[in-house]
Amino acid sequence: MSISAIESVLQQMRATAVQSGITPPAGPAVEHGGFAAELKRSIDNISGAQTKAYGQAEDFELGKPGVALNDVMVDLQKANVAFQTGVQVRNKLVSAYQEMMSMQA
């Protein structure tokens, strides 16, 4: 997997975060720790989306006012899409790692 492919995956993760209503961190990732920091922020964003969605679902189940079913369903789907994107990124990273390890020195 080339650097441009990794950058493409990161760009897709940022686009998914924006579409799901998660604000991406400001500034380039290189200044704040590189790839590992960007990956951690993405995972934290996925976790935050899931926590928000599950909390909203619980509030709806408890009958709290101001929580609409359509909002709960949309947030749950956004969290699911973010999670699935994270799984796909993980699969690509594992594939790239395996490819690198199988190269002959």
Image (cartoon, grey):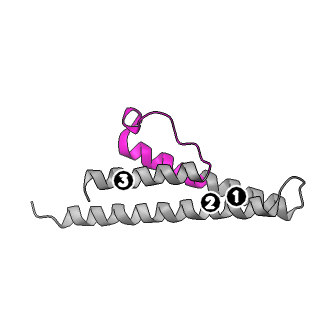
Q: Given contact means CB atoms under 8 Å apart, are the residues at marks 2 and 1 in contact? A: yes
Q: Is residue 87 above or below residue 7?
A: below
Q: Earlier in the sequence, mark 2 or mark 3?
A: 3
Disc 2: which residue = 78
Disc 1: which residue = 53
Q: Nearer the viewer, residue 54 or 7?
A: 7
Task: Report, in whole angstroms, how far the alpha carbon at label 2 lies from the one at label 1.
Answer: 8 Å
Is residue 49 shown left or right of residue 100? Answer: right
Is residue 9 shown left or right of residue 41? Answer: left
Q: Residues within 10 Å of mark 2 (few under 14, many from 20)?
A: many
Secondary element under disc 1, as helix, strand or loop, is: helix
Q: Look at the image and give the residue range highlighted in magenta.
A: 21-47
Q: Earlier in the sequence, mark 2 or mark 1?
A: 1
Q: Nearer the viewer, residue 94 or 16?
A: 16
Q: Of discs 2 and 1, which sits in the foreground? A: 2
Q: Is residue 85 above or below residue 4?
A: below
* Residue at x 60%, y 53% (from the top left corner): 20
Q: What is the three-letter code of the residue carrying label 1?
A: Ala
Question: What x and y, as percent, mark residue 33?
Answer: 39, 37
Is residue 62 shown left or right of residue 76? Answer: right
Let me know if residue 45 appears in the view: no
Q: Residues within 10 Å of mark 3 (few under 14, many from 20)?
A: few
